[in-house]
Amino acid sequence: MAAEDTIFDTSTVKYTGIFSFSDFYAFCYGWIMSEIEPNEFGESGYSEKTPPAGKEIDITWTFRKKFTNYIAFTGTVIFKTIKMKTIEIEENGEKVKKNQGEVVLKLKGNIVTDYLNHFDNSEALQKWRGIYNKWIIKSRVDKFEGRIDDFCTRFMNDAKAFLETEGKR
């Protein structure tokens, strides 16, 4: 069975103000696609409620990037809007529709080893997987863990910057 360890699970971006949720959604999608070109990507969850205070949307993305035939990166991105309403503002002399409310973005990044289950054929092989990961390819695993942490950190920083920049327009 593949081994999965969490590398990045501590960051949340929260923004309250004026923004375009559709632009933010597109920005995040484009960023992930251009930075790691995942082998698998999908929207694994979607729910929407419209209470009187404003729209609440929950969206979950999951993706996987295979680094090698043994090591992969899996990620989960969660979007949540709270009290989101559509408003009309003037931007560059034109009236445009934007959203006002709160948006929360969370990201979890995991490293997965032996995702093809090469070591699952016997108990002896499963023991060897631990030795293989800890002693034989430890430096490679460490390198990929660093890449995952770097990707996650840059994604969250750029998402925060996007929201802050859009809010200042």
Image: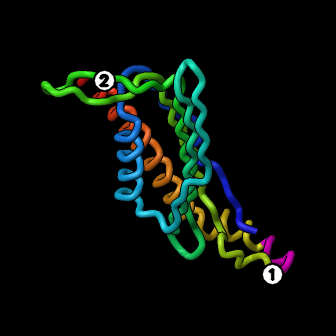
Q: Please indicate whether residue 81 sits to the left or right of residue 127 in the image.
A: left
Q: Is residue 109 above or below residue 167?
A: below
State the CA–CA distance, disc 1 to disc 2.
Answer: 61 Å
- Give the x, y percent position of residue 76: 57, 49
* Residue 139 visible in the shown view: no
Q: In this view, does 78 lie above or below 138?
A: above
Q: Which amino acid does label 2 sit on?
A: Glu
Q: In which quarter of the image is the N terminus?
A: bottom right
Which residue is under mark 1?
A: 121
Q: Which of 126 and 14 is in front in this view?
A: 14
Which residue is under mark 2?
A: 88
SS state under label 1: loop
Q: Which of 94 and 83 is in front in this view?
A: 94
Task: Tell how many labels.
Answer: 2
Give the foreground label among 1 and 2: 2
> Which colour assignment does the render follow?
rainbow
Q: In which quarter of the image is the C terminus?
A: top left
Instruction: Give residue 83's mark.
Output: none
Task: Report the residue that reaches farthest toward the right.
Answer: 123
Q: Which of 132 and 155 is in front in this view?
A: 155
Residues in magenta, as a range: 121-127
Which quadrant of the figure has residue 137? bottom right
State whether the magenta stretch is mostly helix, strand or loop.
helix
Q: What residue type is labelled 1?
A: Asn
Classify mark 1: residues with Cα within 10 Å, few (<14), some (14-19) or many (20+).
few
- Give the x, y percent position of residue 48: 59, 37
Classify mark 2: residues with Cα within 10 Å, few (<14), some (14-19) or many (20+).
few
